[in-house]
Image (cartoon, rainbow, N blue to C red):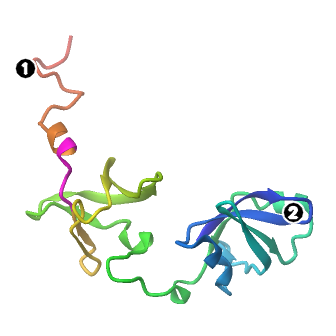
Amino acid sequence: MGVIIGAHGIRGEVRIQSFTQDPISLASYSNVQFASGEALVLERHRMQKNVLVAKLRGIDDRNQSEGLKGRELFVDRASLPAPDIDDYYHADLIGCTAIDPDGNELGVLRAIYDFGAGDVLDINGEFIPFTLEAVPSVDLEKRQITVVLPEYIEAAGDGHSPDKPTDGSQGND
């Protein structure tokens, strides 16, 4: 749900990069915890630019808060709201098999990134925009997503590998 990215001030506050759609909503969950299962209580919080600044119970000075840098924050899946139609939790999509409209396997969805212009799917190292045009259907029960490859990827898939010579030689000198 988020990660502590550093200390804020001298009184033990931390800066949290929230991965929720509305960053401040992370503070509304009552069961925030570290991966170890250790529960966290956010005593107070506020947004500062695009980062959640929070005071955690039991963390009272900068040294303690600096020691938390890099720690990931989680909540129980059961406490998350059901996604709207055509909205998905990334964790539900990662690992799905990608197929083309004809049913041919393209690979596995390895990660989802957002570089600022919308979500991008990493399917075996190819970046595919997560748009309705490029991903017309998602079947979570079958763990499959249908992908229409963009023209720039189809053009690159002309059968020539950069590791293989195109002149017919074996490439061994």
Tag 1: amino acid: Gly
Query: Looking at the image, which residue sits at the far top?
Result: 173
Q: Quadrant of residue 75?
A: bottom right
Q: Position of residue 15 (x, y in %)?
A: 74, 62
Residue 166 location, quadrant: top left
Q: Residues within 10 Å of mark 2 (few under 14, many from 20)?
A: some
**Sequence order check: which comes first, mark 2 or mark 1?**
2
- In the image, residue 142 lies at what x, y percent? 24, 77
- Which residue is rendered at x = 55% and y = 88% of the image? 79
Residue topped by disc 2: 64
Secondary structure, mark 2, is helix
Q: Amino acid at mark 2?
A: Gln
Q: Secondary structure at mark 1?
A: loop
Q: Are marks 2 and 1 in contact (CB under 8 Å)?
A: no
- Based on the picture, tell me whether residue 141 belongs to the magenta stretch: no
Query: Which segment did they paint magenta?
Result: 147-152
Instruction: Identify which residue is drawn at 13% across, 20% down.
Output: 170
Q: CA distance from mark 2 to mark 1?
A: 63 Å
Left or right of residue 132, residue 103 in this image? left
Label 1 neighbour load within 10 Å: few <14, some 14-19, many 20+: few
Q: Is residue 28 above or below residue 96?
A: below
Pointer 1 residue: 168
Is residue 111 visible to us here? Answer: yes
In front: 86, or 124? Answer: 86
Q: Nearer the viewer, residue 166 or 89?
A: 89
Dividing the picture into quadrants, the one containing residue 32 is bottom right
Q: Quadrant of the N terminus?
A: bottom right
- Residue 124 visible, this orientation: no
Closer to the camera, 32 or 137? 137
Say left or right for 130 vs 5.
left
